[in-house]
Amino acid sequence: MAEAARKYEDFIDTPFEGWRIDPAEVRELSRLSPARAIFHIALEWTIVFATIYLSRRVANPILAVPAYLLAVVIIGSRQHALLLMMHEATHWRMFNRKWLNDLVCEPFVTWPVLVSLRAFRHTHLQHHKYLNLPIDGDLQKKFEDPDWHFPVPRRQLFWSLTKQFTGLGLWYAIKIMRYGNADPAASGQTPLYRAVRLGYYASALALILYFHVFMLFVGYWLVPLGTCMVAFNKMRVLSEHPPIERATAYDTILEYQLGPLERILFEPKNCYYHIEHHSYPSVPFFNLPGLHRAMLANAEYRAALKPISYWEMLATLTR
């Protein structure tokens, strides 16, 4: 166990006692696929670089600005997808060995979006352990933040999301980065780890300056990171634990009916199966649809489901 990633037995306990399914089925659904992990990481980076290339190829000055804004949206959505890959790495769901899981995911998934995998793992696993209890750190942060007190007037919710897309809500981006880098000592961010990470950023900056692409880096990486990525992240978080769900203690579970664009932009990597993930965190993202189908055999789970569109969910947050 010291060498291998955590197995499905480490995750089998679920707070939803009435929703248990056959452990053998969970075992099968919990099989990892390093090839898929590599493919998805490579896919996101390929989309990012292809988007930059195509955007820069637009020579018409009238079309250049719309092309750039579209690129910001696309890259921000892929940065958000990298955050979801980080979430998989947090649960050791990418590779079969812990050291390989972190060795690959830190430099190619988490550090580029300015987050520490170790720090996020420390806080996120506490969220799983104390889900929706007063000591759930995620819930505490929402209680402390007026921007997460619902219901609110529709115009207030619209303005809140608009601020994220335009960069006016940069403070929220800073909060995400702080959350993803919290408590260095408790999360295992040793002096050596912090030194290696600092060296990573220093080397990246040196290469950026050497190849004279600093303004491209700012425009095509930092701008999406502080705008669209933040907005898509907030929209996803709103869907994962909306107040309607907490208030009913899981008597009502929102079953999202999503279109392709919604899945690409703010619900990538099957993350809309969030209650299924909390029930069986050992199941990697690519098997969450299969887990959902397996759980449908349970009458209590089926009875709790409420089909709803993402936009209908947003409407429940307004008055």
Image: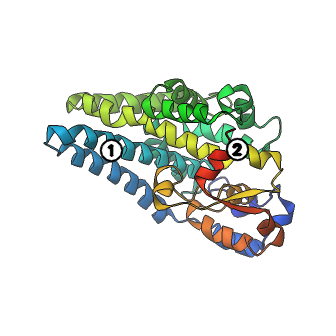
In this rendered view, identify the residue nearer to me: 152 or 264.
Answer: 152
Residue 39 sits in which quadrant? bottom left
From the viewer's perspective, is 258 left or right of 296? left
The quarter in which the N terminus is drawn is: bottom right
Q: CA distance from mark 1 to mark 2?
A: 35 Å
Few, some or many C-alpha atoms within 10 Å of disc 1 (few <14, some 14-19, many ≥20)? some
Tell me, yes or no, if residue 114 can be seen here.
no
In the figure, 145 relative to 69: above or below? Answer: above
Look at the image and name its color scheme: rainbow
Q: Nearer the viewer, mark 1 or mark 2?
A: 1
Mark number, residue 315: none
From the viewer's perspective, is 114 left or right of 98? left
Q: Amino acid at mark 1?
A: Leu
Residue 146 in the image, given as x and y percentages of width and height: 68, 26
From the viewer's perspective, is 43 left or right of 50? right
Residue 183 sits in which quadrant? top right
Q: Going from the N terminus, do you reach mark 1 or mark 2 first?
A: 1
In this rendered view, identify the residue nearer to me: 190 or 88.
Answer: 88
Residue at position x 51%, y 26% in the image: 169
Residue at position x 74%, y 57% in the image: 253
| Residues tagged 1 and 2 counted as in contact (Cβ below 8 A) | no
Residue 161 in the image, given as x and y percentages of width and height: 53, 35
- Where does label 1 land, which residue? 70
Mark number, residue 125: 2
Residue 111 in the image, given as x and y percentages of width and height: 46, 37
Residue at position x 46%, y 32% in the image: 197
Q: Residue furthest left?
A: 59
Task: State the SS at label 2.
Answer: helix
Residue 138 in the image, given as x and y percentages of width and height: 70, 36
Q: Amino acid at mark 2?
A: Leu
Tell me, yes or no, if residue 36 can be seen here.
yes
